[in-house]
Image: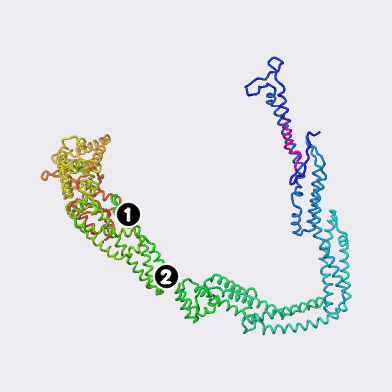
């Protein structure tokens, strides 16, 4: 027997089990668990006895522990496996129960769907009898399947009782069947009644005895209609019979009268067909009589059709000489008449069919009908465009939407062009339609031609002066009040007659509007254009206000001056001539003021730093300082006003602004000229000042601090980075090179007096000291170890002294050779090699940077010297008079002059004593030797040289290297467009006065 019982019930919208399977599952789970729990009752015995183990206390608040077999049972693998198997089996059974109940759940549409709503939607689709039967079969199948299920079923340990559920499901299905049958009955009942009524009515009409042709036609029509509907009626009553058969099959209760009607429906219709055949034979004699009458009527109507056609051609709506409005009236009249004639024709055709006569055609009437259709299309289009135009006429001019007119007329034009395609090309040339078609075409195209004129007149460019001119041309006066002026008044002007004049007016108005907008744009631009004013600081101190860049303003100015120029040349400028001329004058004034203003500001900023920021300059130029003070006050006042109101238009057109700025510019130029003359006197006193810019020179002259020259020393001297001052700055102790090599003057120079004076004495002392140091260095060269000696000397002294001694030693070798020493040159070549090796060894161990640079430079010179001696040995150069020796750059200490002299070929030069520091030398190649020789020969003839060659080949560096060798100042200038004749004059003035060389790099870039 089963362990439990469950009864599924229908609880809309689902099928549920009572009690719920979850409750059964919980109960069974407790049962399984209790089996294991019962083992707690079996208490363990004490070890070695049969006495139960007493409960063991654990704590005061906890229950004592009882040792039972439960922990062993619950941990036993077989027990665990059995419990798992039992649980799995329970779940499996529950799955089978749910699967069994799915048979009922599949029919849930019976109670979930609303019968009324569902079947009403189904009925709206007008389903056939087969579709109704299909739905009924589905429901009956559910009844049969569910009814066949047993009331109880055992699924393992659960007994399922479904009797109640089966009854509920069957009840729902039966109600669906009855409801479907009700809708099926409702769909067929009215058809049954209508068919019975139809049979009765036709039977009664066939019983009439005709006394006239009309009555005969009626009876014959009834007979013909019965015959014609035979096939349709057979299909209809068959469908009605099938539907009632379906209702009976599903036991739907049908009223007895309806059941009788259905059963007799087929018989009654067959009887009606037989009656129609007999009645038709009975009327044969009467039909002959009325056939003759019909023939006479057809002949008369054919004659009448010819007359109708002729009258239509002569007097119809397409007749020539009539206007469109009259044609509309005639169209209505002839349309009504044609309808009556067509009715008569239809009656005659029906009579001919009844009497089996040949059907008479009436081509004249057909022609009138077809022509009338074409005319109807023409006049319909005319009427639509006329009505549209009338509706547009009431539109106020101020509210006119021109796109509405354009779209409307374009649509009418498209329909007009489509007529030949829709109604035949002859519509344009047929004399019956040609006149109204042409009138319609003229009306539409004429209005279309006037549309551009209306659109042009709607332009915002038109002003009162243009409307007055239009009134003069058309001769029609009207009030332009926007509240009363309508489009109809404009239509009355017949604008198409004045198209050229209107086009000229609107074109001129558009051009004038562009000019007006252009002038207004200019006015708007300058109304909002502002100067950018910023505070001007110098040395951290606020000095006033200045204008920022005016490039954008000047670009705007140029563009608008070009626009104004083109406006002035336009033939439409008349109404705006005065404004145009006014703005041209203002633009010219603004441009001139800004140009002068920026020049004044530039010169003021330059001179302000000199006259305001330097008391020394003010003391040396007192008159110019007073003049600049006046300029300074005036300019600051102008800039202060501009800062308060930075409007460009107001600032530039203020009373006397241009004259004030021009006056300031003239005074500033006079101050600058005085300053330039002052600087020229300083440069003349100390020519090296020519190599400084005005600002750099002023930074020296504008202060009493002698150390201010430090930052400019590399421009004043070749490689002198700084002067050595004492702590007070009142004395110059010596010089420091860029490489931090330094030497002290033999005689300390004071910095008293003008800067150009003590700088000139510094220059002289540099040369005296270096001359003395060269003499001492050359003297001690022979008495000291070479490397040790080099460490004690300045770099330039080491280089020069070594070259002096090399020259002397070479000529000494030549003397020994003449005296018979055949190996003297080879021996000297070996000595040069040994000296070079010694330097190379030393440079590898020396750590001091300055000595390393000295040795590196001397290695370059010694390498060249060794190569020259090797070439002498190779080429047997054994006489000092040979060109190979004469062409070398040879250094001598001239005892008569007590100075260093440099000879090369026919050229002879004194040493310059320009301090060179440790600037290094170029590697001397045969090409370098040739360049040296070319330059020295040119200098001996008081000429310059112009080395030529590709970029980066060392032209400039070779010139500078020769200057270093001769201890001359060499100033390099990068030539460009900014180097004009004035700048060149200044450079040459400085070069010739201080005896320096000038090297003009990229000389070909100077514009000629």
Please tell me how many numbered marks the rendered image carries.
Answer: 2
What residue is shown at x 67% (from left), y 20% (from top)? 55
Residue 945, how many percent across, how many down? Answer: 22, 54
Residue 165 badge: none
Is residue 17 within the magenta segment?
Answer: yes
**In this rendering, would 406 be left or right of 105?**
left
Q: Which residues are magenta?
A: 16-30
Q: In the rendered image of this protein, does residue 7 appear above or below residue 996?
A: above
Tag 2 near tag 1, CB within 8 Å: no
Q: In the rendered image of this protein, does residue 766 appear above or below residue 276?
A: above
Residue 535 badge: 1
Q: Secondary structure at mark 1?
A: strand
**In this rendering, would 783 be left or right of 361?**
left
Residue 157, how many percent across, how many down? Answer: 78, 34
How busy is the neighbourhood of tag 2: few (under 14 within 10 Å), some, or many (20 plus)?
some
Residue 792 placement: quadrant: top left
Coloring scheme used: rainbow
Closer to the camera, 288 or 208? 208
Residue 516 badge: 2
């Amino acid at each position: 027997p089963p362990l439990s019982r469950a009864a599924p019930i229908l609880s809309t919208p689902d099928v549920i089990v009572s009690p719920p399977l979850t409750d059964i599952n919980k109960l069974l789970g407790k049962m399984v668990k209790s089996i294991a729990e019962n083992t707690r009752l079996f208490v363990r015995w004490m070890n070695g006895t049969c006495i139960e183990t007493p409960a063991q206390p654990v704590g005061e608040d906890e229950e004592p522990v009882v040792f039972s077999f439960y922990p062993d049972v619950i941990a036993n693998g077989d027990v665990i496996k059995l419990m798992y198997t039992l649980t799995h089996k329970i779940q499996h059974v529950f799955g089978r129960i749910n699967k069994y109940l799915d048979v009922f759940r599949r029919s849930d549409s019976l109670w979930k769907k609303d019968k009324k709503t569902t079947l009403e939607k189904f009925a709206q689709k007008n389903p056939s009898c087969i579709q109704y039967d299909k739905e009924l079969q589905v429901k009956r199948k559910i009844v049969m399947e569910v009814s066949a299920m047993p009331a109880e079923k055992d699924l393992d340990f659960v007994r399922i009782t479904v009797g109640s559920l089966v009854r509920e499901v069957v009840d729902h299905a039966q109600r669906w069947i009855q409801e479907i049958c009700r809708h099926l009955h409702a769909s067929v009942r009215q058809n049954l009644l209508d068919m019975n009524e139809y049979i009765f009515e036709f039977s009664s009409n066939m019983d009439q005895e005709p006394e006239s042709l009309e009555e005969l036609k009626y009876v014959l029509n009834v007979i013909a209609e019965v015959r014609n509907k035979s096939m349709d009626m057979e299909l209809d009553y068959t469908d009605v019979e099938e539907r009632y058969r379906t209702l009976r099959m599903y036991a739907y209760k049908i009223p007895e009268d309806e059941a009788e009607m259905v059963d007799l429906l087929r018989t009654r219709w067959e009887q009606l067909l037989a009656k129609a055949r007999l009645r038709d034979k009975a009327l044969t004699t009467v039909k002959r009589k009325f056939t003759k009458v019909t023939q006479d009527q057809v002949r008369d109507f054919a004659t009448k059709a010819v007359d109708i056609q002729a009258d239509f051609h002569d007097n119809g709506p397409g007749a020539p000489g009539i206007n469109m409005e009259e044609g509309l009236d005639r169209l209505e009249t002839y349309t009504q008449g044609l309808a009556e004639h067509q009715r008569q024709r239809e009656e005659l055709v029906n009579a001919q069919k009844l009497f089996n006569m040949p059907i008479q055609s009436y081509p004249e009437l057909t022609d009138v009908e077809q022509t009338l259709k074409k005319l109807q299309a023409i006049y319909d289009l005319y009427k639509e465009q006329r009505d549209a135009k009338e509706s547009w006429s009431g539109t106020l001019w101020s509210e006119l939407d021109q796109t509405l007119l354009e779209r409307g007329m374009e649509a009418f034009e498209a329909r007009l062009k489509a007529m030949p395609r829709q109604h035949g090309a002859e519509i344009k040339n047929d004399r019956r339609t040609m006149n109204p078609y042409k009138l319609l075409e003229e009306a539409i195209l004429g209005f279309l031609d006037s549309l551009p004129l209306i659109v042009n007149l709607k332009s915002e460019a038109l002003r009162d002066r243009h409307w007055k001119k239009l009134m003069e041309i058309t001769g029609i006066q009207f009030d332009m009040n926007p509240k009363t002026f309508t489009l109809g008044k404009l239509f009355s002007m017949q604008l198409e007659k004045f198209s050229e004049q209107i086009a000229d007016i609107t074109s001129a108005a558009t051009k004038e509007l562009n000019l007006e907008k252009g002038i207004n744009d200019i006015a708007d631009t300058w109304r909002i254009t502002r100067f950018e004013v910023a505070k001007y600081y110098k040395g951290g101190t606020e000095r006033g206000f200045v204008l920022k860049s005016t490039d954008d303003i000047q670009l705007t100015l140029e563009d608008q001056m070009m626009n104004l120029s083109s406006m002035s040349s336009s033939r439409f400028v008349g109404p705006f001539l005065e404004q145009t001329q006014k703005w041209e004058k203002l633009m010219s004034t603004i441009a001139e003021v800004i140009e002068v203003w920026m020049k004044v500001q530039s010169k003021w900023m330059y001179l302000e730093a000199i006259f305001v920021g330097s008391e020394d300059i003010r003391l040396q130029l007192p008159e110019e300082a007073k003049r600049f003070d006046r300029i300074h006050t005036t300019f600051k006042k102008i800039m202060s006003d501009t800062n308060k109101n930075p409007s460009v238009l107001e600032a530039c057109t203020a009373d006397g602004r241009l004259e004030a700025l021009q006056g300031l510019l003239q005074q500033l130029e006079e101050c600058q000229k005085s300053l330039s003359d002052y600087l020229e006197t300083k440069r003349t006193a100390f020519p090296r000042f020519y190599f400084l810019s005005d600002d750099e020179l002023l930074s020296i002259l504008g202060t009493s601090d002698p150390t201010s020259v430090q930052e400019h020393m590399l421009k004043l001297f070749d490689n002198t980075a700084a002067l050595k001052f004492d702590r007070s700055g009142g004395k110059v102790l010596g010089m420091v090179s860029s490489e931090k090599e330094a030497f002290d003057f033999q005689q300390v120079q004071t910095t008293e007096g003008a800067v150009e004076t003590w700088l000139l004495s510094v220059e002289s002392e540099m040369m005296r000291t270096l001359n003395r140091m060269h003499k001492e260095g050359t003297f001690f060269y022979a008495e000291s170890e070479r490397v040790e000696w080099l460490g004690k000397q300045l770099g330039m002294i080491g280089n020069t002294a070594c070259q002096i001694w090399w020259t002397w030693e070479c000529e000494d070798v030549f003397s020994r050779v003449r005296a018979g020493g055949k190996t003297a040159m080879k021996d000297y070549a070996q000595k040069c090699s040994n000296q070079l090796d010694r330097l190379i060894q030393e440079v590898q161990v020396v750590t001091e940077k300055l000595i390393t640079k000295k040795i590196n430079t001397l290695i370059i010179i010694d390498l060249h010297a060794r190569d020259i001696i090797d070439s002498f040995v190779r080429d047997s150069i054994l006489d000092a008079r040979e060109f190979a020796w004469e062409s070398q750059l040879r250094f001598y200490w001239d005892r008569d002059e007590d100075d260093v002299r440099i000879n090369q070929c026919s050229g002879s030069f004194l040493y310059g004593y320009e301090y060179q520091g440790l600037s290094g030398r170029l590697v001397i190649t045969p090409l370098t030797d040739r360049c040296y020789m070319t330059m020295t020969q040119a200098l001996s003839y008081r000429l310059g040289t112009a080395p030529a060659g590709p970029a980066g080949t060392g032209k400039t560096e070779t010139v500078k290297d020769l200057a270093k060798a001769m201890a001359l100042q060499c100033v390099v200038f990068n030539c460009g467009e900014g180097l004009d004749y004035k700048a060149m004059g200044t450079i040459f003035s400085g070069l010739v006065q201080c005896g320096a060389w000038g090297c003009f790099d990229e000389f070909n870039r100077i514009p000629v």
